[in-house]
Structure formats: structure tokens, C-alpha cells
Image: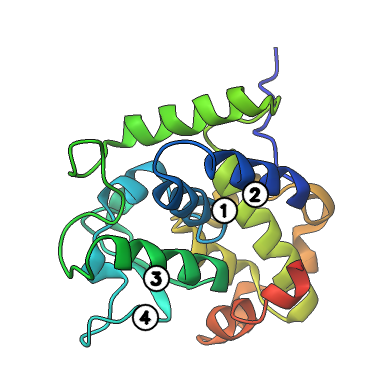
Amino acid sequence: MNKQPAKVLEPAELRRVLMHVQNIRHPIRNRTMVLLSFKAGLRACEIAGLSWPMILTSASKLGPTVNVSCHIAKQGRARRIPMHPDLAATLAILHAEAGFITEGPVICSERQCHMTARSVVNWFRDTYAQIGLDGCLSHSRRRTFITRSARLLAKTGGSLRDIQELAGHQALTRTERYIAGTVTHNASSLPSPELSRPTTTLNILNRRTRHER
């Protein structure tokens, strides 16, 4: 029996998730977890391990990127992800709630320490179940982020290599497997990796908000 791919959430479904998590304990932390997944494409282990120095500048202000260090990234593949405006706004509130600290976990457990990757996975699983989103699996978060990023980059001149860098994948073939919908049938609709420019991802994805709203 063929394994079904993880569901890619539509914008309306993501809004349902965000509305739901606002009405349970730790609403700002919850919203941050969701946005780190769907707007920055972080894995469960990266959400669990993310610390304030990875998103703050030397002046202790929120920076323009989420800097996933090799210490928390899968296979040690560090990367920089453009900070989505919705994520930046929510992180600013979370940072203020935490007392503008400069060290320690961004996402805290009930004991005010780093959550485990398993706890993050279980939290999303329970959230999907409570809302009744069928077909949502652990990979739904990153698959949604990667698919939507690929669709945007296909329209605005990016390449598949840009998506690979955002996702932190070692192989392009793995990135292709994550992409669903109108981009899946023709990965060549994205320019070849050799044509990408170093600044493409940052420049293009920083403009994505107006395409999403």
C-alpha cells in the first residue's frame, strides 16, 4: 500500500490553526511555534533547539533572518531563513513577554527549558486532531512551507537550489519530493540551480507577504 504524502495546508486551514492555538494555554508561544513551522520551515528539532541568539542581532534586536545553527540543524546543515513579517511581529511580543532576554530557548516547555523534538511533534499532532484537520502529518508543516516557497520563487525568478537552501536539504531530489501541487508536475518550471543568484532567496521571499494576503 502506497504511503500518502503529508497534507499541504491551504491558507484558510492555517488560519484555523492560528485561531485555535490563540485560545489555549501559552497563546503567543503557540503562535510562534506555528509560524516557525509554516513561515520559516523549521523542523521539530530546530524549533525545540532554537535560542534567542539565533534570531537577535548584536544589539539584542530581532534580526532579518532566522539563523538555524549547525548545532540544531539536521545533519549540521546551518542556514539562514528570511524573517516573515508575521513571524517577526509574534517573536517581538514573545521576546517582550520573556523580559527581552538574550539567552535561552525561544520556545519554552512548562518547566521553562527547551522542549524536546518529540514534544513539538506531539503538540502539532494533538493540535491537528483537536481542529479536525484530516491528513495532517508531522511533515505537513515543512511541506506546506516548501511548496508555497517554490510556487512563489517559480513566479519571481528563483531556482530549485534556493528552495533546497531554505529547506536545509542535502539533495535536490529530496526537496522535489516535498513540493506539492502545481509545482510538482514540473520542477523544471523553476530555473536550473546553476542560474540562481546568492541573494535570490532573501530578496524574493522578503516580498512574499503581499502575494499571500
Q: CA distance from mark 2 to mark 1?
A: 7 Å
Q: Which label number is shown at residue 28?
A: none
Q: Which residue is mark 4?
A: 63
Q: Position of residue 151 (x, y in %)?
A: 75, 64
Whether residue 117 is visible here, answered yes or no, is yes
Q: Nearer the viewer, residue 176 or 67?
A: 67
The reply to whether discs 3 and 4 touch (Cβ–Cβ < 8 Å) is: no
> Mark 2, mark 3: which one is toward the viewer?
3
Q: Which residue is mark 3?
A: 92
Q: Secondary structure at mark 3?
A: helix
The reply to whether discs 4 and 1 touch (Cβ–Cβ < 8 Å) is: no
Residue at 39%, 70% (x, y): give it: 92
Side (left or right) of 181 relative to 72: right
Q: Which label number is shown at residue 38?
A: 1
Q: Amino acid at mark 1?
A: Phe
Q: Secondary structure at mark 2?
A: helix
Residue at 26%, 50% (x, y): give it: 49
Residue at 68%, 54% (x, y): give it: 147
Q: Position of residue 46 (x, y in %)?
A: 34, 50
Q: Quadrant of residue 65?
A: bottom left
Whether residue 190 is visible here, answered yes or no, is no
Q: Amino acid at mark 4?
A: Gly
Q: Secondary structure at mark 1?
A: helix
Q: CA distance from mark 3 to mark 4?
A: 11 Å
The reply to whether discs 4 and 2 touch (Cβ–Cβ < 8 Å) is: no
Q: Amino acid at mark 3?
A: Ala
Q: Which residue is mark 2?
A: 144
Circle 4 packing at 10 Å, graded few (<14), some (14-19), many (20+), is some
Position of the N terminus, as image quadrant, is: top right
Q: Position of residue 131 (x, y in %)?
A: 65, 28
Answer above or below: position of 9 versus 50. above
